[in-house]
Amino acid sequence: MTHPTGDVAERAAAGFTDQYGGSAAAGRWAAPGRVNLIGEHTDYNDGFVLPFALPLRTVVAADRQDGERWTVWSELSGETITFDADDVAEPGRVTGWGAYVAGVVWALREAGHPVPGARLAIASDVPLGSGLSSSAALESAVLAALLDLGGLELPAERQPRLAQRAENVYVGAPTGIMDQSAVIRCRAGHALFLDCRDESVEQIPFDLDAAGLAVLVIDSRAPHRHADGEYAARRRSCEAGAAALGVTALRDVTVDQLDAALAKLDDAETRRRVRHVVTEDQRVLDTVALLRAGRVRDIGPLLTASHVSMRDDFEITVPEVDTAVEAALAAGALGARMTGGGFGGCVLALVEADQADAVAAAVTAAYANRNFTAPGTVTVLPAPGATRLN
């Protein structure tokens, strides 16, 4: 995972000064990327997820400007774009990366908030396209900036839904509520236990540092293969399974009921999809119970079991991802799993902190042996959610 050099907050501030005539920004607002510790494809089944925030951040330096006009510079593209109230009147008028910014303005205005005109400069350490929620980080940092600049009141528990609406409706990306919830509501040293049915959250202690552990995040660098169509197909299978079982969502089937439920399903593929979701929900609950008890090391086998289920029952892994998991485990990781929607993206491995470099080297060597593009690796601890920096 390579990023522009230097502190991301300083880069955003310098970008603002360079782009806007030498003046300093009124403030800087940051939002992190996120990784899902466990709970994959459970979100749209009304189930449970357990993400935590990454130390990789998107930072927005911003100040007000007169009128209903927004000017945005992006470090990544080097572009400056400007849009006004007419441009954000309906989805589709601002496209490309600017749509994520315009979408937040649109969603705030749709919710009745008088959004101030603003100049913004954006810098980020969250890699694009690797399943670490770079889009949610951007939306949430922009949202935090506009709320503060305008003196707008929007409780933290309502912010994820507004940011999700910006992405779903204005940008047109069908994300669930997990990404924005994690990016906005996570706390340092904790994972966010989110019930995707009622959107209630609980901060679960996940103090890796105190346990002498870390999470190694491995960017598989695998090209996403048919991800959109396959994601939709998995969702349809889950909906069909729930309908056949007469439940609102697969969350309503417990592990104790699983064998009887599977016996009611004629289609082998649907049985596999249902088995993954039901057992994955239970793995989230088991992981939460272990973390509440301070047994951080003991969650490793649950992470690995989650990966096996995604590989064999949900069938969403690819060779690069499986190779990363296998190499990390062979090198001493306590557990490892793919994280994200599948067909590429990232792997996380729970490792002894002093072994992180050795595990990363083992994964890199395994990639070289299979002639895969070298993976990216970064060692992380749970970080805070969206915040104002100054």
Image: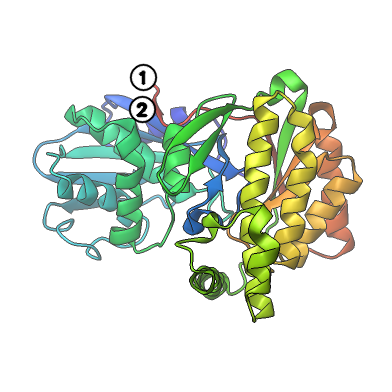
Residue 293 location, quadrant: top right
Residue 298 is left or right of residue 341, and the answer is: right
Residue 158 is left or right of residue 376, and the answer is: left
- The earlier-in-sequence mark between 2 and 1 is 2
Residue displayed at 79% across by 63% down: 372
- List x then y, in percent, for residue 68: 11, 44
Farthest residue, direction bottom: 266
Residue 252 is left or right of residue 172, and the answer is: right
| In-front residue for pair 53/51 | 51
Q: If the image is split into quadrants, where does the C terminus sit?
A: top left
Query: Is 161 located above or below residue 307 in the figure?
Result: above
Residue 184 appears anywhere in the view: yes
- List x then y, in percent, for residue 242: 51, 68
Residue 91 is left or right of residue 30, and the answer is: left
Where does label 1 land, which residue? 390
**What secondary structure is marked by label 1?**
loop
Residue displayed at 18% across by 31% down: 150
Residue displayed at 42% across by 35% down: 184
C-alpha span from label 2 to label 1 = 6 Å
Mark sitting on residue 28? 2
Mark sitting on residue 70? none
Here the colouring is rainbow
Residue type at numbered disc 2: Arg
Residue displayed at 64% across by 81% down: 266
